[in-house]
Amino acid sequence: MKNIKRIACIIMLILILVGSMYGCQNQPENQISDSESSYSNKMEKEAETLDEINSLLKSWEIFNKTCSEENSDMFSETLTEASKKAIASEADNQKIRLNLYCRGDLITAYKRFADSFRQFYSDPSRYTIEIKINASDDYFEKYISDPEKEADVILCKDSELAETIASGNAAIINDNIKKMVETANTEEAIRSCTFNNKLYGIPAFLDSGYYLIYDKRVFTAEEIQNLDKMIQIANKKAKNIAYLIDDPYYSSGIFLAAGCRLENDGKTQIIDYNNENGFNAAKTICQLSACQDHGFIGVGNAQSVISGFSDGNICAAVIDSNYLSEIKKTIGEYNIGIAKLPEISINQQNVNLHSLYGFSTAVVNPHSAYPFTSQLFAYYLTSASSQQELYNYNGIIPSSKIYEYDYIINDPFYIAVMSQSEYSHIRTMTVGNHFSEDMESYNIAKIILEKNGNLSDEQLRNLLEEIPQSIIPSRKIAAQR
C-alpha cells in the first residue's frame, strides 16, 4: 500500500509540475520576480505541492468528510472513529511507524503523551502504532538538513519555524484541524505559527521569554520598577544587576523600547537601528556600560548569571525564563521574585524595557509517509490536556486557553508573563533563529561595553550607520541540501 501511494503521489506531482511549467511558459518573463525564483520560494512551493497531493489521499477524505458532517471536537466518538479509519488507510502492512523529536528535558512527558495517543487510537484488528522519540541538542539541525530521513513530527522553537517554512520542511496544517487549534489556543500563539494566513505549526506551550528575576532579600516590590534605581541599590550593597546586552537578543529590548523596528520572515532580517530612535537607545547603552561592575553586568552567559546568584555577586537579572528553576535551586524558592522587566531612561523618559518571547510548536514533516496520522499526533501532543499536564509536572505555561484556570492565573510566572506581554515581541516575526550570528559584525552594544560607554555622539552614529537595514540570514539552506 505504501508503494502504491508513493507511485500515485509521484504521478500527481508530475502532473502538477507540468501544469505549472506550462503556466510559466505563457507568462510574460518580466512578471517573474526575483523573489519568486529564490531558493526558499521554490522550497515553499514544493512543500505546498506535497500538501496538495497529501490532501487527495483517502485518509484526509475520510476525516474531512466527517468534519463537514459533524462540527464536534477531535475527541468526540464520531471523529475518533473517523480518525481510526483514516489511520487504517495509511497503514503500511497494518503498521504505523512515527518518529518524534523533542527537547531532552521533556522526553519523559512526551513519552507519556505518545503512550496515551497509542492507547486512544489503537485498533489491533486494523493496525498497530509504533512511536519512537528522540531528543538531542542538534535535532533541529538534523531535521532541517535532511528532513526526508528525519522525524514525522518535531517540537521546535517558533523562531526556528520561519526557517523551516522557507526551506519547505513544514506541512500546512489541515483546515479542519486548524479551526480546532485556533479555538483552543491564544491569539498570540496562533500568530506565532501563521504565515500568509496558513498555519504551519501547532502551538505546544510558552517556550521562553525575558523576565526580571530578583532576590527578594535585596529588593522590595517597589524598588524593582526602575532599572536605574536597581543599579544604584545594588552598587551600594556591592552587588550587580545582570542584563547581558552583549548578546543582540537582549540588547534588542532597549532598541525596541526606543521605537526601533525588527522584523524577520525566515528569509530576510530587518534591523531598523540607524535612526534617531537607535541613537537614543545607543546612548542608554552607554549609560549602562559606564556602570559596569558598579551595580551592573552586561557581559556573560546564563551559567555565569547562575554562578553570580550563588556567590552573591548578582542579586537580579534580566534572563530567559528557562533558567528560573536553576536560580531557584541556587538561592532558594522563597527568596526568589519574578516580575515583568523594569523601566529604563531613554532620551530622558522612563519607558518599559521590551523583550522577545516565543512558543514551542509541533511541526509536521511534509515528507512523512503518514500525513494524516502525523498531523493527528501533533494535535494530540499539543492538546489542552497535554498542556495542562506539562504545567502540572513541569511548570510550563500553556499556550492553550487553560491559562484562564485559577490555579494558573495566580502563578507568579504567569503574572509576570501577562504584565510583560504589552512590551513583548513574538520571535517568529521579530528575529531569526540565528540573530546573534547575523549581528556578530554589527554588535554595537558589545562595542559600547568594551569602551565602558566612552564614545562620542559622532562615534555612535558612525557605528549605527554600519548596521545594514536588512541581512540575509547566516544559514545557507541551499548549500546544505
Image (cartoon, helix red, strand yellow):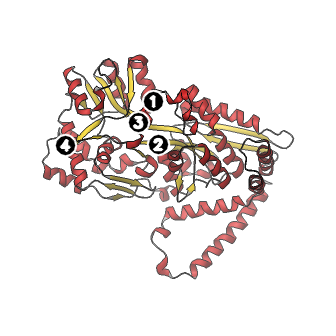
The image position of residue 438, as x and y in percent, is 36, 51
Residue type of the residue flagged with mark 3:
Ser
Residue type of the residue flagged with mark 1:
Phe
User: Is 342 located above or below residue 260 in the figure?
Assistant: above
Callout 2: SS = strand
Q: Are marks 2 and 3 in contact (CB under 8 Å)?
A: no
Instruction: Give the residue pinned by disc 3.
Output: 419
Instruction: Give the residue pinned by disc 1.
Output: 413
Residue type of the residue flagged with mark 4:
Gln
Q: CA distance from mark 4 to mark 2?
A: 31 Å
User: Is 84 located above or below residue 115 in the figure?
Assistant: below
The residue at 78%/57% (across/down) is 58
Q: Earlier in the sequence, mark 4 or mark 1?
A: 4
Callout 3: SS = helix
Residue type of the residue flagged with mark 2:
Gly
The residue at 18%/55% (across/down) is 462
The image position of residue 439, as x and y in percent, is 33, 49
